[in-house]
Amino acid sequence: MTLNNVTEQQLEEIAQSIASRLFPGAFIALFGDLGAGKTAFTRYAAKALGIEDIQSPTFTIVREHDGSLPLFHFDCYRLEDEEELYAIGFDDYLARGGAIIMEWCERVPYALPNERLELHIEGSGAMPRTLRFVPVGEKYHTLLESIKC
């Protein structure tokens, strides 16, 4: 599914709609250039989970947040490859049953779980964006079909 000319307000509504349907073990893989809105999407999604303090985890790689569903927010921008991700305990995060939203997934493509919701964001800043959703696995097809965009 592709949405064109998505405003900041629409991005917030979409992120919150998706987040309200997340489940333990859910994985959202974010792709896009600097300034595309990956952290903004995460901030809006987190708000639906009752989490207010979202910041980019670029320097720490992952931030843990307690909400109605635990959220693990990854930023892989500074990683060289999947080995570095696994070295910080990525497998443990996958097993903990929270939701994971990961930015810069293009840096670690082989670490992505077999089932996930991919969001490819084009555009940047305050300009309208293009969002392309790629559901991988039945749960994510169902999740995507249940939101109104």
Image: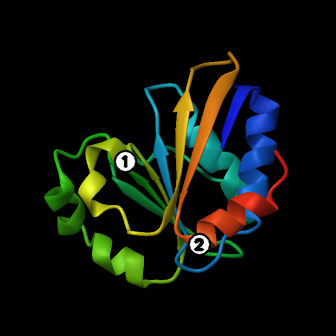
Image quadrant occupied by the N terminus = top right
Q: Which residue corresponds to mark 1?
A: 105
Q: Is residue 113 visible?
A: yes
Q: Are marks 1 and 2 in contact (CB under 8 Å)?
A: no
1 or 2: mark nearer the eye: 2
Tell me the kind of residue under disc 2: Glu
Left or right of 68 in this view: 10: right
Query: Could you tell me which residue is drawn at 81 percent across and 33 percent down?
Result: 9
Distance in Å between CA atoms under marks 1 and 2: 21 Å
Left or right of 31 in this view: 39: right
Q: Could you tell me residue 74's position as x and y percent?
A: 42, 55
Q: Is residue 132 above or below residue 115?
A: above
Circle 1 packing at 10 Å, graded few (<14), some (14-19), many (20+), is many
Image quadrant occupied by the C terminus = top right
Tell me which corner region of the image, top left, top right, bottom left or bottom right, holds residue 47: bottom right
Query: Could you tell me which residue is drawn at 60 percent across and 46 percent down?
Result: 133
Tell me which corner region of the image, top left, top right, bottom left or bottom right, holds residue 111: bottom left
Q: Which tag, 1 or 2, sits closer to the chain's start?
A: 1
Observer-nearest residue: 39 or 114? 114
Look at the numbered disc 2 and give the secondary structure of its residue.
helix
Q: Which residue corresponds to mark 2?
A: 138
Look at the numbered disc 1 and give the secondary structure of its residue.
helix
Q: Which of the numbered marks, if any, corresponds to residue 38?
A: none
